[in-house]
Structure formats: structure tokens, C-alpha cells
Image: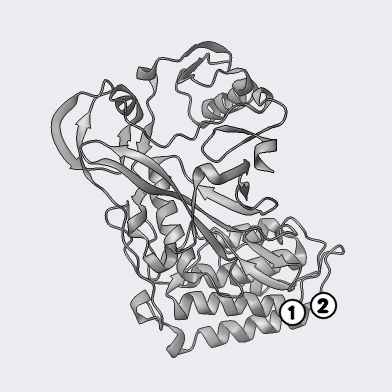
Amino acid sequence: MADGGEEVEELVIQALAGYVDQLDADVKLVNFSIDGDVISTSSDAADDSAQAPLYCLIEMIPEHYRSGRVVSRADLVECVDLVTYRTQPGSRAMFKYQFHHNQALRNWHELNCWMRLSGHPNIVPFDRVVTDHEDVPDHGTFEVVVGFTSVFVPGLTVQDNPSRIFKLKHLEQLIKVVDDLNLEFGIVHQDIAPRNLLIDPVTDTLQIFDFSCAGKLGWEGATKDQWLFNNSGSFKLDLIGVVATVYEIITRDTQLAAQVLMGAEITTIEEKEWVKHPDVNLEEDVSHYRQTLRNWLERRSQPENLITHYTQATSQLEWPQSWRPEVPWLDRDGNSLGEYSPCSSVPRAALRALGLKFVEWERPAHNKIPDGFRVLGNGALAAQTDLE
């Protein structure tokens, strides 16, 4: 398809969305016209241009985090990212994974961060490490970490359930968890927003989740992993995130909240009158929420709270960078090109040509799943009767 920038890319996505259920499971390439019409498809393995991530070894997770908390991808019963553990009918958890090799690196760092924070009352609990097996050229077969699950909290996010009462204690809990992340653990969330907040309907406790954009305070990032999990040495994004989030919850003015998060001065919100949206339910007058925020920002500006590096935190978090084994450069036919280098991915076509196993994420089209069958986390089908 001709290169026309973002508009062409959006056209391709729309065209593929309308056609994807008609594709065979083994299709590797789809050619579109400039108008978004399908010209041809290919199931030739050589046309698979994707990279297979070399996921990190399960042994890289400390034993005390693994004990009783590892589940095979084949033991997850899927419904998009909401899953059931096959051995626990009726259970529910959220499965987070990445199949693009660059994003798989990010998933590794998010997993390690979230896992070490689990147990905090205002953080959605980490649940299981999810594994599978893959072959690594010249190294052998390994059990690898392909993702993780977190506990499913019913009731929708704060963004998706705006009619729920936002209590003053919920704001205080948000402040508490941000203080702990920043000052105790040296972690900056960097994506605080209503979409990343839940309120547990059983305990009436606010909980934060999604650490995919997080960073260690003042850390240059994982040097082997494209400097992921980096931070410039400032908590500013989290402070702004809390203020913008509470402003958005109260006023439902998403536009101004977004502008501040994108770089506009926080005074744009602080100096503005906060008019409660008529459909918003608060426990106290708006002034109480604003005063709580002012007091917090004042406290966070005190010298003892102005650390600039995660190593200054009281309980700093550390974890290993990703595994990058020395593997041969391979062409699509699996032929060695004579050089070796540390890699985080290998061409899928090369692995297929060599008969090596890699982690596949293809799923059958919904309209091709037989009645009475469910899709497992590894893409295989299982009869519902076998899962009961």
C-alpha cells in the first residue's frame, strides 16, 4: 500500500477491522489498495516479517515471588484480557501481556515493579506470573515469563463509573499511595488518571493500577532495554496527575485536565473556579477537596520530600534488566549470517524454518470458534465441558 502517513495507516486499520474475521488463521501478509480494498493475502511463512520476543527466564524472578504464584498460559481461559484460571472455575483475573518485542521489554519492567508493590492497600494486587516455553537458537528450550495477572476488581474504573460517590477519603487514599510510591519506593507512576483508578466496592478503598508508564525516580532507564522505566528526577508528573485527576472527576472537564497533563502549567487548574458537574456525586463541598490538595502540595514542597533519585527512597526497588542472550543473526530461511549479538527478539520466519518453538499470540476469529468451546491463553480451543 502506498505511503501516505497517518491517514493511510488509519485507513488500513479500519479496512483490516472489517476483514479480519474472514482471514484464515495462517495468513501472514495482507496487501491493501490505497482505497482500503484487499488486493491479496499470503500464507507463506517467509512473508512473516514479525519478530518473536525472547522473553525473560522464569529463574530471573526471585523464588519467594514465584512460590505458588506461577501459572502456565495454557491454564488461562480467556475473554480478551479478563481470564479465568483453569484450575479455579469461577475465578477472575486481568491478564497483561505484550507480543511486540519492544513492548515485551516494557512488560518485564512493569511486572517486576508491580510485583514488588503488591500488598499495598491502595494498589490493585499483583496475582500470578504467566509462563510458556520457547526455543532460543543455540541455547535450548526455556520456560519464560510472557506476562502477569492482577486481581480483578469489579465495579469499573473511576472514569467508567462516574456516578459513584467520590469521597474525601478516596482523595486521601490517592495522596497516600502517591506519597508511598514516590518517597518510600522511589517510583513515579507517570500516568495518574481516572482510567487507572478503581474503587473496591467491598472495602470502599481506592486503588491504582497500570505501571506501564512508570519510572524509577532519576534513573536513566534500563540501558539494555531502550532506557525503559526512566525518569528525569522529578515527581512533577505525579503531583500534576493527582490535581488534574481530581479536577476532572469533580468538573468532568476532560479537555483542561488533558492540557495540563500534556504540559500546560498546573496554575491553569489551580487558579480556576472548580464548578461541580451536576451529575457528579461528592461527599463534601468542593472546597474541602481543594484544600486537601493545597495542603498536600505544600507538604510535598518541603525540603525533606524533595528527593531526586530512587536510591534516596526509604525502600527503593531493584530488579534485573531483561535477558538478552547471544544468538546468531538469521535470515528468514533460518540460515546463519555468521555474526552473534545480544538480542531481545528473533525473526519468526527463521524460527519456523528451523522448526523451533516460539510464543504465538494468534487467536481464532470469534465467528470460527465452535459452540461449546473456549479459547485458552495459548490460543488452543477447549470444550466448555472439560473446563467445568
Q: Is residue 178 above or below residue 314?
A: above
Q: Using the image as rendered, state which of residue 41 and residue 150 is in the foreground.
A: 150
Q: Is residue 49 left or right of residue 152?
A: left
What distance separates the C-alpha of mark 1 from that of mark 2?
Answer: 7 Å
Looking at the rendered structure, the kind of residue marked 2 is: Glu
Q: Secondary structure at mark 1?
A: helix
Looking at the rendered structure, the kind of residue marked 1 is: Leu
- Mark 2 neighbour density, 10 Å: few (under 14) some (14–19) many (20 or more): few
Q: Using the image as rendered, state which of residue 31 and residue 367 is in the foreground.
A: 367
Q: Using the image as rendered, state which of residue 259 and residue 12 is in the foreground.
A: 12
Q: Residue at x 57, y 76 (%)?
A: 177
Residue 327 location in percent, x, y?
A: 21, 39
The quarter of the picture where residue 21 lies is top right
Residue 274 numbered tag: none
Residue 194 location in percent, x, y?
A: 66, 61
Residues at marks 1 and 2 touching, judged by CB atoms closer than 8 Å: yes
Q: Residue at x 50, y 63 (%)?
A: 190
Residue 283 numbered tag: 2
Q: Quadrant of the C terminus?
A: top right
Residue 238 location in percent, x, y?
A: 53, 70
Is residue 309 visible to us here?
no
Is residue 358 visible to us here?
yes
Mark 1 or mark 2, which has the lower sequence index? 1
Q: Secondary structure at mark 2?
A: loop
Total tally of numbered discs in the picture:
2
Q: Is residue 282 above or below residue 131?
A: below
Residue 168 numbered tag: 1
